[in-house]
Amino acid sequence: MSENKTHIRRVLRSTADDNPPVGAVELFFDLVYVLTIIQLSHYLLYDLSWQGAAETAVLFLAVWWGWNYTAWAMNWLDPEHAGVRGLLVVLMLAALGMAIAIPDAFGGRAALFAAAYVIFQLIRSAFMVAAFRGQVMGRNYAQLLAWSGFAGVFWIAGAFVPDDAQLVVWALAVLIDYVAPLVGFWLPGVGGTDMADWPLAEEHLAERNRLVFIIALGESILILGTLLSEIELSSSVVAAAVVGFATIVLLWWLYFSRRLGNAEHDAPERSEATAMARGAYAYAHALMVGGAIVVAVGIEQITHHPLEDAEWSMAGTVLGGPVLYLVGNVIFNAARTGVVPRSRLAALVALAVLVPFVPAMSALVLGIAALVVLAALAVVTGEIRTSTEPRAEQGAGQEAIGR
């Protein structure tokens, strides 16, 4: 038993570290997601049909879940341990396999994507079972491993079914993966695991999500810069590029809002941290990061075709990206504070009001309209302020939080 405890101490972070820093190997691991996000945005850009959007959503939800579970695992693992570093390198290789398979994931590289994803999930969970062997967390991860294996059956099967059934089978696999934490990884004869059995350093997870959101915003910069280097810089193109850049800035500004965004904040009570983090980071951030990716596609469209009539597929990205982000932000705040911010709901209504007018707008006008909604949201909620103004304390009053 003493040998077992020594092994645990060597692989896991110190229990005395309530706010573990993000390790260099975690940042290194995130590099592969730069390529993954580029691949996802281009997949959607090249197929803006309902089918293309659904396929992109399934692929994104898979790669997000792989990243999400890894970020959670690194709450407990010591990033300086050679074994942990080796694990992340192996996971990077699997994630790279997923990334290079994305362009043809619903075609000739379906098996590569499915195999890379399943290996990614199973190896990490098996490592965690070994790291926590003999502990409650070892049991928890064993149940997570079982659920990942169950979902993996559908991922692998989906790679070999007829093309018209692949999306359905993989959507079912995604559903299994995302439902698992909500039912406590329940297994027959074993039961589920209570959220209190997953002790968590919440600020570490918050920082990991901040970093990956920045990566998602970086894709917008890459798309915008690449496009501008390849096309003629007419006045309308420059105007659209400015609108796109301002949209990126506002999305960043809103995300790092001290009142309603994922800025540094006081840590919640230990007993509440894990339950809060599941909603705020695992699920809400899937929508927020996904929204940032869709915004990148919308920026490319309005910049490439600024004076053309706005099409419904274009509206789906130019308006849909901010909608996804705001819905995620509503869930994020509801999970963290128990309050739904009314300002975000008002912005969602404003974006919905724009929909009937889409056929009468050019691409540039549509982009400006979406930008105005985001700018008004930032101004009205007091998130654009001068440095001389006093900084609002996190959670200072339900009225401020609910704005």
Image (cartoon, grey):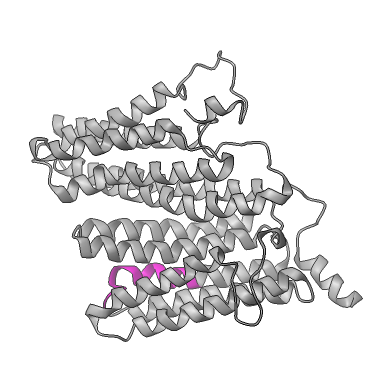
Asked whether residue 386 is drawn in magenta, I would say no
Give the position of the N terminus as an image quadrant.
bottom right
Q: Is residue 267 left or right of residue 251?
A: right
The percent coordinates of residue 332 (x first, y second) are: 50, 44
Region rendered in magenta: 94-107
Asked whether residue 96 is drawn in magenta, I would say yes
The quadrant where residue 59 appears: bottom left
**Residue 249 visible to an observer of this rendering:** no
The percent coordinates of residue 292 (x first, y second) are: 37, 46
In the image as oriented, which residue stretches furthest toward the right? 2
The percent coordinates of residue 129 (x first, y second) are: 69, 75
Location of residue 185 with respect to 329 vertically, above or below: below
Location of residue 75 with respect to 305 vertically, above or below: below
- Give the residue at x 48% y 65%: 178
User: Looking at the image, how many numbered discs can be counted on the residues?
Assistant: 0
Q: Please, what is the dominant secondary structure of the magenta stretch?
A: helix
Q: Is residue 133 left or right of residue 286?
A: right
The quadrant where residue 140 appears: bottom right
Is residue 79 or residue 365 the one in the foreground? 365
**Residue 371 visible to an observer of this rendering:** yes
Q: Is residue 322 left or right of residue 214?
A: left
- Give the residue at x 56% y 41%: 338
Is residue 123 or residue 172 the one in the foreground? 172
- Give the residue at x 79% y 76%: 134
The percent coordinates of residue 84 (x first, y second) are: 68, 67
